C-alpha cells in the first residue's frame, strides 16, 4: 500500500505536469482555448520537430476517421524565429484545438510519463468543455459575466507575471496602454468616468460578457506576445500592449461589431450581485 508521503509526491508531480499544459494554453478572440504545436512538442518532451510531426500526422488521420474536419482542429500557421546574425526565418506551426491535443497525446510515445499525464489532462478537459458549452448557453447574462470576469482575473495575474519579467514596474501605466489601444485612446479612468463609476470601482466588474471577452483576448494575446518576442524593456512592453489592444479594436471594427466603448454598462456590478447571493461562484 502506498504511504502518504509517496502519494503526496505523485500528486505534486501530477499537478506540475498539469500546470505545464495550462501554462501553454492560449485563448482566441472568441474565448476559445487552443495550443500551439511547437509549445506542445516541448511539453511532451519531443526533442525533434520531425518526430513530433509524425505524431501530428497520425492524429490527423484519427481526426478524419472520426468524421471531423481536420482544418477545424489542426490550423497551420506561420511563425518567425531568430536564427542569428539579426536574421529570422518562417517555420511551420499548428494552432491546435483541445480535441487535436487529445488525439496527439493518444498517438504520442506512451513510455513518456508526461504523455500519460497529458492523456488524462486532455481527456478530462475535453469532457469538461463539452459539458460546459451546453451549460454556458443556458446561463443568464450575469452568470456569463461572472464566468468571463473570473477568466480576466486569472489572465491579468499571468499577464502581470510576464510583464514584470519584461521590465514593467508601473503597472497602472502598462494596463492603461492596453485600454487606450482597445478603447480608442481611453484610459481606465476615462472608462470609469464614462460608466459613471465610483472612485476606484473596478471597471471590469462593470462590463457585460461581450466587453469582458474583448478584454480577455487583449490580456491573453499581450501575455503571449511579450513571451514570444522576449520583450525586456518597460517601453517595449507598454507599446506591445497598446498595439495588441489596437489590433483587436480594428478587428472588431472590420467585422462590424460593437466597439467596446459603445457596449452597455450593466445595471449592477458583479460585487453587488455576489453580495446579494444571486450568482454562483464559478472561480474554480
Image: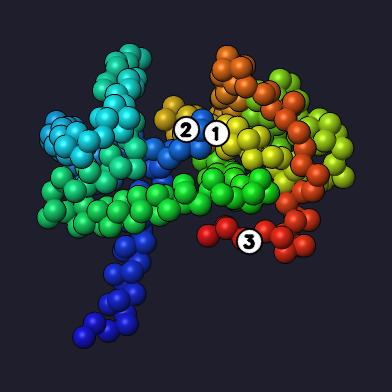
Secondary structure under tag 2 reads loop
x 69%, y 27%: residue: 260
Q: Are marks 2 and 1 in contact (CB under 8 Å)?
A: yes
- Residue drawn at x 21%, y 52% is 115
Check disc 3 and report the residue beneath it: 280
**Numbered badge on residue 217:** 1
Residue 264 placement: quadrant: top right
The residue that appears at 24% across and 82% down in the rendered structure is 2
First reached walking from the N terminus: tag 3 or tag 2:
2
Q: What x and y, as percent, mark residue 175?
A: 66, 34
Residue 171 horizontal side relative to residue 161, left or right:
right
Distance in Å between CA atoms under marks 3 and 2: 26 Å
Q: Quadrant of the N terminus?
A: bottom left
Which structural element holds mark 1?
Answer: helix
Identify the residue position indicated by label 2 in the image. 28
Q: Nearer the viewer, residue 138 or 153?
A: 138
**Mark 1 vs mark 3: which is more N-terminal?**
1
Query: Label 2 to label 1, Cα distance in Å?
Result: 6 Å
Q: Nearer the viewer, mark 1 or mark 3?
A: 3
Task: Provide residue 236's location: percent of width, then percent of height.
Answer: 56, 25
Amino acid at each position: 500500500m502506498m504511504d502518504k508521503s509517496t502519494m503526496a509526491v505523485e500528486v505534486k508531480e501530477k499537478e506540475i505536469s498539469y500546470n505545464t499544459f495550462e501554462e501553454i494554453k492560449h485563448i482566441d478572440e472568441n474565448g476559445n482555448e487552443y495550443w500551439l504545436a511547437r509549445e506542445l512538442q516541448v511539453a511532451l518532451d519531443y526533442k525533434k520537430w520531425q518526430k513530433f510531426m509524425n505524431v501530428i500526422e497520425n492524429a490527423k488521420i484519427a481526426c478524419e476517421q472520426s468524421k471531423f474536419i481536420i482544418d477545424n482542429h489542426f490550423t497551420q500557421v506561420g511563425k518567425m524565429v531568430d536564427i542569428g546574425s539579426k536574421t529570422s526565418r518562417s517555420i511551420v506551426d499548428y494552432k491546435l484545438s483541445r480535441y487535436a491535443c487529445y488525439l496527439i497525446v493518444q498517438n504520442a510515445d506512451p513510455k513518456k510519463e508526461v504523455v500519460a499525464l497529458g492523456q488524462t489532462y486532455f481527456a478530462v478537459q475535453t469532457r469538461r468543455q463539452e459539458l460546459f458549452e451546453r451549460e454556458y448557453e443556458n446561463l443568464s447574462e450575469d452568470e456569463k459575466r461572472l464566468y468571463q470576469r473570473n477568466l480576466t482575473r486569472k489572465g491579468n495575474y499571468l499577464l502581470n507575471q510576464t510583464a514584470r519579467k519584461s521590465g514593467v514596474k508601473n503597472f497602472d501605466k502598462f494596463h492603461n496602454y492596453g485600454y487606450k489601444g482597445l478603447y480608442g485612446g481611453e484610459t481606465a479612468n476615462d472608462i470609469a468616468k464614462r460608466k459613471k463609476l465610483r472612485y476606484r470601482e473596478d471597471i471590469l466588474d462593470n462590463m457585460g460578457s461581450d466587453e469582458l471577452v474583448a478584454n480577455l483576448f487583449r490580456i491573453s494575446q499581450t501575455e503571449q506576445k511579450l513571451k514570444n518576442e522576449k520583450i525586456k524593456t518597460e517601453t517595449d512592453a507598454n507599446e506591445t500592449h497598446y498595439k495588441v489592444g489596437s489590433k483587436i479594436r480594428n478587428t472588431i471594427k472590420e467585422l462590424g461589431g460593437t466597439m467596446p466603448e459603445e457596449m452597455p454598462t450593466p445595471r449592477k456590478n458583479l460585487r453587488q450581485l455576489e453580495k446579494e447571493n444571486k450568482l454562483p461562484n464559478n472561480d474554480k
